[in-house]
């Protein structure tokens, strides 16, 4: 039994898709969630900046005495994955967990990964999937408008702005006849309904966030490190009221249940 909290972070709302999955797998865990909303979007930052920001966020959460960390962010996982190994507690990124998940899928149709511009330009997802799904064509599609749309409250499948962006970005996946689509950015699970409406339910969606949560859970179970009282603390470098409203909508709880505390955004590292 280990009651120390699990740390989860992302540039904003996206990591809540990981938090939700983690709560489904291990509801008793205590969690400290950090939404770096004051510096969103990460997808437009340089690799050097992202690597510095990954270190800053890992250090911030380590200050809470966490027992493990979920980097619920595809952009940091694909640009700073090697940094996780330096951390003294188990730290799971959503890139390697996604590749493991994808390697278990059968079939030979092309697979597509959608993620931020910084994730796709790093090539890390494409390399990991080529190794995990031998013989399958891999398409990497950057979707830079998704995160700003989601962070500004456009998430509904009936929202014309969401529908238009989904159509624009996912047409190549449809044309390539991709049978599997990896949501390589954790924000994208929030607009999953709009994505399924466009691609059809015969296309399998894989959530990087959920794969990360599952990988972290199995590590904790294996090391006998589970335990807690289901307490969640939220911190944001953005506006706590804005975060609480959006988070409560996504998590399906009352706004009053999300006590988000403000922390000043750290300086963006040079580079
Ligand atoms: N949700 C993050 C990801 O998975 C970050 C998106 C962003 O801030 O651009 O990549």
Image (cartoon, rainbow, N blue to C red):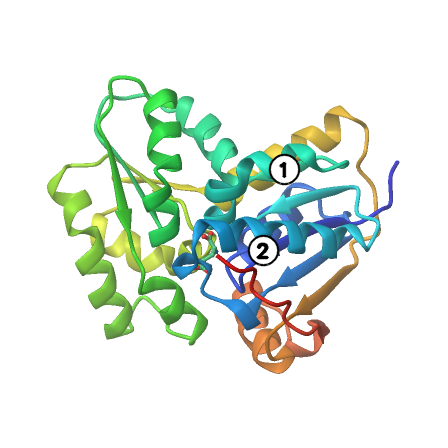
Comparing 234 with 84, the one in front is: 84
Outermost residue, left side: 175
Which residue does the numbered mark 2 point to in the structure image? Answer: 53
The percent coordinates of residue 50 (x first, y second) are 51, 53
Above or below, 242 relative to 128: below
Q: Which residue is drawn at 68% across and 50% down?
A: 58
Q: Which residue is drawn at 46% across and 34% down?
A: 98
Q: Can residue 155 be seen in this view?
A: no
Q: Decide: few, some or many residues near mark 2? Use Cα within 10 Å; few <14, some 14-19, many ≥20.
A: many
**Which quadrant of the figure has residue 204?**
top left
Comparing 126 with 229, the one in front is: 126
Q: Residue at x 43, y 59 (%)?
A: 45
Q: Is residue 243 left or right of residue 66?
A: left
The reply to whether callout 2 and callout 1 are in contact (CB within 8 Å) is no
Q: In this view, does 142 lie to the left or right of 82?
A: left
The percent coordinates of residue 126 (x first, y second) are 33, 33
**Is tag 2's residue or tag 1's residue first in the polypeptide sequence?**
2
* C-alpha gap between disc 2 and disc 1: 13 Å
Disc tally is: 2
SS assignment at label 1 = helix
Q: Is residue 195 visible?
A: yes
Task: Judge: label 2 CB < 8 Å from ligand 1.
Answer: no
Which residue does the numbered mark 1 point to in the structure image? Answer: 84
The percent coordinates of residue 31 (x first, y second) are 74, 54
SS assignment at label 2 = helix
Q: Residue at x 33, y 53 (%)?
A: 117
Q: Decide: few, some or many residues near mark 1? Use Cα within 10 Å; few <14, some 14-19, many ≥20.
A: many
Q: Is residue 18 left or right of residue 57?
A: left
The percent coordinates of residue 173 (x first, y second) are 19, 43
The numbered dot on residue 10 is: none
Above or below, 137 relative to 248: above
């Amino acid at each position: 039994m280990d009651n120390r909290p699990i740390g989860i972070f992302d540039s904003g709302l996206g990591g809540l898709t990981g938090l939700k999955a983690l709560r489904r797998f291990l509801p008793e865990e205590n969690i400290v969630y950090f939404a770096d909303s004051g510096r969103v979007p990460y997808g437009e930052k340089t690799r050097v900046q992202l690597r510095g920001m990954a270190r800053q966020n890992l250090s911030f959460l380590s200050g809470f005495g966490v027992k493990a960390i979920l980097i619920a962010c595809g952009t940091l996982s694909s640009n700073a994955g090697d940094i996780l190994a330096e951390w003294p507690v188990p730290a799971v990124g959503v890139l390697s967990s996604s590749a493991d998940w994808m390697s278990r899928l059968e079939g030979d149709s092309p697979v597509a990964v959608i993620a931020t511009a910084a994730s796709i330009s790093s090539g890390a997802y494409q390399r990991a999937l080529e190794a995990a799904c031998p013989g399958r064509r891999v398409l990497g599609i950057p979707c830079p408008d998704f995160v700003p749309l989601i962070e500004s409250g456009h998430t509904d499948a009936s929202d014309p702005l969401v529908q238009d962006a989904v159509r624009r970005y996912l047409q190549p996946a449809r044309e390539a006849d991709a049978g599997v689509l990896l949501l390589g950015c954790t924000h994208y699970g929030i607009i999953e309904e709009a994505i399924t409406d466009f691609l059809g339910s015969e296309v399998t969606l894989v959530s990087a966030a959920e794969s990360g949560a599952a990988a972290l859970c199995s590590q904790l179970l294996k090391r006998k490190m589970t335990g807690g009282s289901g307490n969640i603390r939220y911190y944001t470098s953005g506006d706590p009221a804005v975060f609480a409203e959006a988070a409560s909508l996504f998590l399906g709880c009352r706004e009053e249940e999300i006590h988000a505390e403000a922390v000043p955004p750290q300086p963006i590292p040079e580079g």
